[in-house]
Amino acid sequence: MNIQNFISNYKNHPVLFIGTGISLRYLKNSYTWDGLLKSISFELTGDEEFYLDIKARSEEKGEFKFDKIATLLEDEFKIRLEKDRHGKFKKINDIFYQNMKKDLKISRFKIYISQIFSTLLYKEEMIKEITELKKIRKNIGSIITTNYDKFIEETFEFKPLIGNNILLSNPYGSVYKIHGCISEPDKIIITENDYKIFLEKYELIRAQLLSLFIHNPIIFMGYSISDENIKNILKTIFTYIEPSTEEAETIRNNFLLVEYEQGSNSESIMEHDIDMEGFSTVRINKLKTDNFLPLYTALSDLNLPISAMDIQKVQNIVKEIYSGGNIKVNITEDLDNLHNSERILAIGSKNTIVYKHQNTSEMMSNYFKIIDEANIQVLSLIDDFKIQKQQFFPIYGFSIINKNIKKSDKLKKQQKKKLESAFTYKNNHQTINNILNDDNIANSHKENAIGYSIISNQIMLEELKKYLIKYENKEETAYRKLLCAYDYKKYS
């Protein structure tokens, strides 16, 4: 079976379990566990053999224990930085002492790790694949990762959950950072003691995640078939689920391991048996490839009855109801007699209950996200909206993604006509900053001047895109005018 057919059988939103391999694939500044510790050791000592010595002391039963190496390296890091306050690692010492003045004791070693990953340096040759990766977020329920960096939450715009927050969360639209994150260095799990504490708490975290593993398709990315994270998850599930049952078979069919194989363009799913060492052998599905585009395309094209974004909204409302929020709930009569396709969950004012996922205002506010995701389902709602003649609405980009919008031609004529007279403040500026800093242009005319420079090809579209993404109030008419100008110049 190929990947497209396999993914199309999903009945629920998949959950991604993402490991180091994904960061290694897309980022210049990413490391294996061994590579990270080796790099820190050399930066600290300038001696390659120092790391080899502590690595040799950390071998157990033929395997190198990287948590033990990290423990030894953390101790050495502390000793050397204490003795050299204003040396090479002065900035790390500065942060350490600033925290200590607030009674926050955070390891210098972990502060340094957070600095290493503080900036995301993307590989230029992988930008196309990252763009396609962004498009799948509309169909992803949640993500679990062992990575410290922020690549996942910045790509998917999901809420990161760290430490105890994992136990207090709603799953949809969340990134479970089970080994910590650079945003909270004290919660990074890397040393022997960190793992000891983590495993003591892991029972609660495991219980929280178990429901996801059982009810959703799980896609492992950035791990090898022998990774302990995968084996531990499988052991957890099949401790609670009898391996020979129909439920266990459903779970197995939902599991997919995407394993990197250099140079391969394979799109074929194979079955693979994992020996659980004293536990039962578990058969899962595996894709070995170096081309992730077909996987991302299949996930982006997945068409489920309700979007992951809608479920997230519902969960937030239900959480508010549980916590005693001031929300009135009305349940219609004869609910049991309604067919599933007839059931509607409406949340909002009873006077404006025609709301359907996104209205035109929300579509314009979320314009770049919808374009990035190629969200055909959301754009199908445009035909249901009443878009007035005097309204600015960016139809060109949307119509390229969803070619079945019936109002497309009418809205294009409307958009083009409105833009002909929208921007009248003539100027010769070639950057937005120059316009904003020009005291001769009144603040009330800044956007008009920017629009004129865009329409007359004086300002690069990429600069306008960045400006619009950061625009504070996306409800303003000025934003909508500029967005329509961008949309027309980019996609007409």
Image (spheres, rainbow, N blue to C red):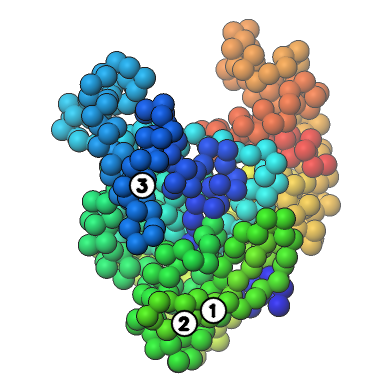
The answer to whether residue 46 of the structure is visible from this angle is: yes
Foreground pick, 115 / 282: 282
Left or right: 173 with respect to 368?
left
Total residue callouts: 3
Q: Nearer the viewer, mark 2 or mark 3?
A: 3
Tell me the residue that label 3 is attached to: 56
Q: Secondary structure at mark 2?
A: loop
Residue found 60% across the figure and 48% down from its top: 25
Left or right: 331 with respect to 82?
right
The image shows residue 312 at horizontal and vertical percentages of 46, 62
Foreground pick, 387 / 282: 282
- What separation in Å lies between label 2 and label 3 (alpha carbons)? 33 Å
- What separation in Å lies between label 2 and label 1 (alpha carbons)? 6 Å
At label 2, which amino acid type do we have? Thr
At label 3, which amino acid type do we have? Ala
63 to 268, vertically: above or below: above
Mark 3 Cα within 10 Å, few/some/many (few <14, many 20+)? few
Q: Residue furthest top?
A: 440
Mark 2 touches mark 1? (CB < 8 Å): yes
Tell me the residue that label 2 is attached to: 281
Which labelled disc corresponds to residue 273?
1
The image shows residue 219 at horizontal and vertical percentages of 54, 66
- The quarter holding residue 258 reads bottom right
Residue found 55% across the figure and 52% down from its top: 22
Looking at the rendered image, the quarter that the N terminus falls into is bottom right
- What separation in Å lies between label 1 and label 3 (alpha carbons)? 33 Å
